Image: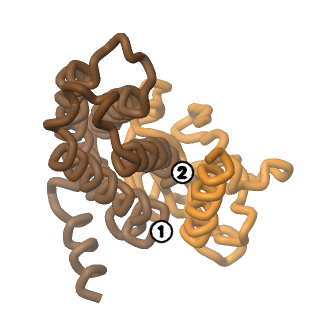
Chain colours: A brown, B orange
């Protein structure tokens, strides 16, 4: 009940009205969101495959240094733009199970990435000798999560 | 692993069906419906503008199009404001919800395609 009131208040806010109101604001925010998602998914999948042992001519450490900032910038774009899109239609989206599932997966995906860095960052320099089964499982989990997130994100509009 | 991915996506898809919305697939495009009359109210918003009209004694939600698409095709906000007489052609929701996705609208003497 509280949550429903909060969603209604958010949807009625002038911020939400501005997102859905103009002819071009909504498509612009939508474009930002897609760009952010593209940065996240592209960079994370590439890094995950390197962690799993693909493209060994690129060092795992180098791949991480190149790709992690893209993922972070992607999140910095996708999260606020996603919140704006949510705000514009908060009441009905709050009842959308696909969106909640997506948000849970994003939280698990970010947690997994942070944990990976905590556990294995110092070992990336000589990764092929230091990779563990847990690290590989985390990379596979990450691939599954970050493919599912945009699939669910798109399905939010149709289911 | 492939099966796992498809299984996961399938499960999420099923979980979401209760909240079904939008996409032309939710509408019965074998039956074109025409509604003529005054606009009861207008929601001039993205991702789709909506108007409400009476049909067979019920209030129907008519889903139009993104604002930028309507404006670029010459349909103005004042053409579809509450009280204006319009004609819409479109398709009703398959699940019985009184909602129509409009294929086109005739307003202020203009016929505007909405798809």
Left or right: B62, with A40 as reference point: right
Does dot 1 land on a helix, a strand or a loop? Answer: helix
Q: Residue at x 17, y 24 (%)?
A: A65
N-terminal of the pair, mark 1 or mark 2, is: 1
Q: Quick check: B28 left or right of B39? A: right
Badge number at residue A155? 2
Quadrant holding the N terminus of chain A: bottom left
- The foreground one among B81 and A65 is A65
Q: Residue at x 17, y 38 (%)?
A: A121
The answer to which of B86 and A13 lies nearer the viewer is A13
Q: Residues within 10 Å of mark 2 (few under 14, many from 20)?
A: some
Tell me whether circle 1 and circle 2 mark residues in contact (CB < 8 Å). Answer: no
Q: Is residue A1 above or below residue A133?
A: below
Q: Which mark is residue A97?
A: 1
* Label 1 chain ID: A
Q: Residue furthest front?
A: A129
Which percent across, then down, holds residue A140?
A: 45, 44
């Amino acid at each position: 009940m509280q949550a429903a009131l909060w969603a209604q208040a958010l949807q009625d806010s002038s911020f939400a009205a501005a997102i859905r109101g103009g002819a071009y604001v909504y498509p612009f925010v939508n474009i930002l969101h897609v760009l952010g998602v593209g940065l996240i998914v592209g960079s994370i999948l590439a890094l995950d495959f390197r962690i799993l042992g693909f493209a060994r001519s690129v060092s795992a450490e180098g791949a991480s240094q190149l790709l992690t900032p893209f993922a972070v910038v992607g999140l910095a774009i996708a999260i606020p733009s996603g919140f704006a899109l949510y705000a514009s239609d908060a009441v009905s989206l709050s009842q959308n199970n696909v969106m909640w599932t997506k948000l849970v997966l994003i939280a698990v995906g970010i947690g997994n990435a942070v944990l990976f860095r905590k556990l294995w960052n110092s070992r990336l320099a000589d990764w092929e000798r230091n990779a563990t089964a847990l690290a590989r499982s985390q990379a596979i989990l990450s691939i599954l999560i970050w493919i599912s997130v945009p699939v669910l994100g798109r399905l939010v509009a149709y289911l | 692993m492939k099966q796992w991915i498809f299984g996961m996506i399938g499960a999420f898809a099923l979980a979401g069906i209760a909240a079904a919305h939008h996409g032309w697939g939710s509408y019965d495009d074998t039956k074109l419906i025409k509604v003529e009359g005054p606009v009861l109210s207008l929601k001039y918003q993205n991702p789709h503008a909506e108007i409400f009209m009476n049909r067979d004694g019920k209030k129907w939600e008519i889903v139009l199009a993104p604002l930028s698409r309507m404006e670029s095709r010459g349909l103005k906000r004042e053409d579809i404001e509450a009280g204006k007489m319009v004609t819409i052609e479109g398709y009703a929701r398959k699940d019985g919800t009184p909602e129509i996705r409009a294929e086109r609208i005739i307003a202020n003497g203009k016929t505007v395609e909405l798809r």
